[in-house]
Image (cartoon, rainbow, N blue to C red):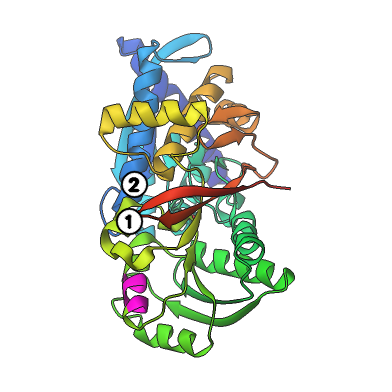
Amino acid sequence: MLSKLWTTLAAAAIGLTALGSCALGGDTIKIGHYGSLTGAEATFGRSTDNGIKLAVEEINATGGVSVGGKKFKVELVSDDTEGKPEKAGTVVTKLITKDKVVAVLGEVASSVSLQGAPVCQEYGIPMITPSSTNPDVTKVGDMIFRVCFIDPFQGLACAQFARNDLKFSKVAILFDQASAYSVGLKDEFGKALNKLGGKIVSEQAYTKGASDFNAQLARIRETGPEAIFIPGYYSDVANIALQARKLGMTMPLLGGDGWDSEELAKNAGDAIDGCFYSNHYAPDQPTEIIKTFVGKYKAKFGGVPDGLAALGYDAANLLFDAMARAKSAGGTDLRAAIAASKNFKGVTGTITLNQDRDAVKPVVIVERKGGAWGFRAAIEPK
Ligand code: PHE
């Protein structure tokens, strides 16, 4: 009770000091980003940070974000988690207590978000994860939101694509046993494939960063699957693809959004030809909003934005949209405005937050063909 009272007071104080700089003539408002700016998933954090930076630059070019009828320049404070769950608590605590951010964006990896979210909840500071898809992340509390779909739907979409489009009935799974994302997505995919009349013929586990996947692949090979579903992150997936092809296993590999990094094709080369993964958007989808975003991103950063960049951009813009509707930048007011977000036109789709503080959006399937990833299908939520 006392600690609850204390955090409520602390949150109110933070809400005040965050805007306090305007009293000094600064007229700024700070937002935080925690992400894997280095480490095995470094492209996740860097792409997200780029997407957020682009959104911040654009809002500041209009004079800033309006809060309670007054404009503030947005200042972004980004901090590195190295992709490690055990770093998240310290990094988020520092953003809130030292930098005095009014809202937190991040993380990408669900296992890292699951450690950062309780800190935001405790301090009463809203957090929006652009891309963590494990259902448990927003269940941490009413301060925690996401602008992406969740894994029960992503798993279903992958299973539907494997079963109905590719006509596969026997699929093996190779998953990261230490990752909340990987374990959750493999369960959802397996459940859905079974319901569609398919079968998981083998389920093998690995631990992130392993160098040898031969034992698991050999066991999978014995069961004769038509495809292998690998709900992991891109660094491991590249190694798995290379080792599978070395063993003479030529079946398509299927994955989830964790594959989304230009590093995957760089490291795996033609070992991932003919493979598929589910994602939040495809840069070659011919909509106006995507074309505009890709053009602006290329001009600023010089590369094609991946799904992480698009989601970072959407998360930041949805936050600015909520700020403009909020009574104040205090946690409670900001939280209420974010929760009320409806039909927000994002690059990754139209975002309405449901009562679980999750977004309900289509899943996109991309395919590796002719040395490039291309849009293959969109699967709409029911
Ligand atoms: N959805 C993944 C997770 O929850 C993170 C991710 C999202 C990775 C989008 C790549 C692209 O862990």
Q: Is residue 303 above or below residue 88?
A: above
Q: What residue is pinned by disc 2?
A: 45
Find residue 235 and report its horizontal and vertical position in percent: 32, 63
In the image, what residue occupies the spot 48% across and 84% down?
Answer: 220
User: In terms of secondary structure, where does tag 2 sit?
Assistant: helix
Find residue 209 and report its horizontal and vertical position in percent: 31, 70
Q: Is residue 169 above or below residue 100?
A: below
Q: Hey, what amino acid is under mark 1? A: Glu
Task: Left or right? Give the position of 326 relative to 311.
Answer: right
Q: Residues within 10 Å of mark 1 (few under 14, many from 20)?
A: many
In the image, what residue occupies the spot 42% across and 48% down?
Answer: 107
Find residue 66 and report its horizontal and vertical position in percent: 48, 14
Q: Look at the image and tell me whether residue 74 can be seen.
A: no
Q: Look at the image and tell me whether residue 345 can be seen.
A: yes
Of residues 56 and 77, the one nearer the viewer is 56
Task: Left or right? Give the position of 52 relative to 353.
Answer: left
User: In terms of secondary structure, where does tag 1 sit?
Assistant: loop
Over which residues does the magenta segment extend? 239-245
Find residue 65 and report its horizontal and vertical position in percent: 44, 17
Reply yes or no: does residue 244 show up in magenta.
yes
Residue at mark 1: C-beta within 8 A of ligand 1: yes
Task: Left or right? Give the position of 159 relative to 291.
Answer: right
Contact between labelled residues 2 and 1, with CB atoms less than 8 Å apart: yes
Residue 351, numbered circle:
none
Reply yes or no: does residue 329 show up in magenta.
no
Q: What residue is pinned by disc 1?
A: 41
Q: Hey, what amino acid is under mark 2? A: Gly
Specify the principal SS of the magenta part: helix
